[in-house]
Amino acid sequence: MNAFFRGTTLLIIAAFFSECVEFFVNMILARELGEEGMGLYMSILPIIFLVFIFASLELPISISKFIAENKRELHYSLLQHALKLASFVVLIILILTVIVLAFPTVLNGFHPYVKWLLIGLIPITAFSSIARGYFMGVQQMGKIAFSNFLRKAVQFGVLLLIFDYFHFDQQASLLIALSALIGSELIVFLYLVSLFLIHMQTMRSASNSNMSGKLAREKLLAVSLPTTGLRVFHAITNAIQPFLIQSALMAAGFGAVGATEHFGVLTGVAMTIGFFPAFIAHSLMIMLIPNVSDAYVKKDHEKLRNLLQQSMSLTMIYGIPAVFFMYIFAEPLTSLFFSSPEAALYLKLLCPYFLFHFFVIPMQAYLIGVGLVKDAFYHTVWSHIISFSMMYFLGSQASLHMVGIILGMNTGAVLLSLMHYFTICRKIGITLWFTKQRQSVY
């Protein structure tokens, strides 16, 4: 367990500095792009994340899970087959992306070069995901932590340098912002892949066992496909959410520009501030997947219980004070971006949404570790159906508008966290208070 705490602490420290840099990145974007431009930027981010998910095929999770569960002699053979699988995925995704982007209505209103940025992101993501999964599996979290910080630092440096000395129109500014985002991924790719190739050369000279390509693909895809389905669903709902919110606001009497501006304030300001502490949850997620996978394979019930209890306790320790701080200091925090009384109100109302998502992130990793990816997917589907229904119904009411939308978001977060937690407790045979209930059914 000491290794778990050391790795988690290292990731949390690096992620804290990364989130600090991310905070400044969003401040630069908010001031340079304005409310409408920030809304456009946040509207295209889900599309970029969707490309990222398809290109990576969630290989970091499946590879890290396999590495943690299996002997070192099998690692080299699996990674070779993973590289072949990634090459095939890159080819297919490139073809599909080029076909989709050929339609003139796709990304209408954005600079033409944005399409080329999306195409370039595909191979970068696919191959860096293999390196990331390997280092997660062998729990060399220093490399993961540094790569996460490097991404944010490069993005911040590029934006600060360009926007400090030059001024552009909105379309060009959006292109530069997106170029900085993709460019930072390229730098991380070069860093991780170079280290990964060194490790591959070392493993090549060691004693290795071979496994068939079919078996390797089955092992990887058994985790990657359902996890990708979960992430794709998240990406699709995130891509739909801007249109859902804007449609509800327009039904409530807002104009098109006003609806876009309010969405930009909600996601670019309130949610940027609210999700700042989530770097701790993501650090827990990275550490939980290999550790829970290892404990589950060994049927170490006590370790599984301890991992759940410790992750939930740590989430409470930082989550509750964090949302309390955001509620008390909502006005000065949101004024760091631009003066908007709506942003402060949205931040306060979203406090339950943020708190319960801090719990959801490590619990989702836990579900993956014990082989319940499908359950996580079903929970996500049901919570989004209820959340989106409430968001549109309440948000389209003239008396509620954005307040109704936030009520729907809060409901979905609470429902999702409860379903995750009850399922985990039932799977490992404990009560809601972490005491042993019955023998584990796995």
Image (cartoon, rainbow, N blue to C red):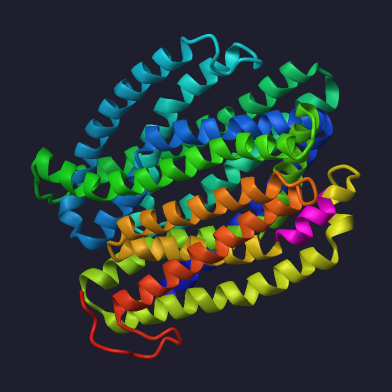
Q: Is residue 11 visible?
A: no
Point out residue 317 in the picture as x, y percentages from the top left corner. 63, 77
Say which residue appears at 31% left-offset and 56% top-offset: 374
In-front residue for pair 244/326:
244
Start and end of the magenta stretch?
343-350
Give the tally of numbered discs.
0
Q: Position of residue 298 (x, y in %)?
A: 21, 74
Q: Quadrant of residue 365?
A: bottom left
From the top left corner, tell me how far across and down residue 240 is, in percent: 55, 36
The answer to whether 432 is drawn above or below residue 34 in the figure is: below
Which residue is located at x 58 percent, y 66 percent? 356
Residue 96 visible in the snapshot: yes
Of residues 259 and 324, the one nearer the viewer is 259
Magenta-highlighted stretch: main secondary structure?
helix
Please name the residue shown 42% across and 86% down the image: 434
Q: In screen coordinates, is 51 left or right of 267?
A: left
Place residue 372 in its image quadrant.
Answer: bottom left
Would residue 297 be found to the left or right of residue 249 on screen?
A: left
Q: Is residue 134 shown left or right of residue 233?
A: left
Quadrant the C terminus occupies: bottom left
- Residue positioned 63% across, 48% down in the render: 393
Give yes or no for residue 252 being in the magenta stretch. Answer: no
Height in image: 373 above or below 165?
A: below
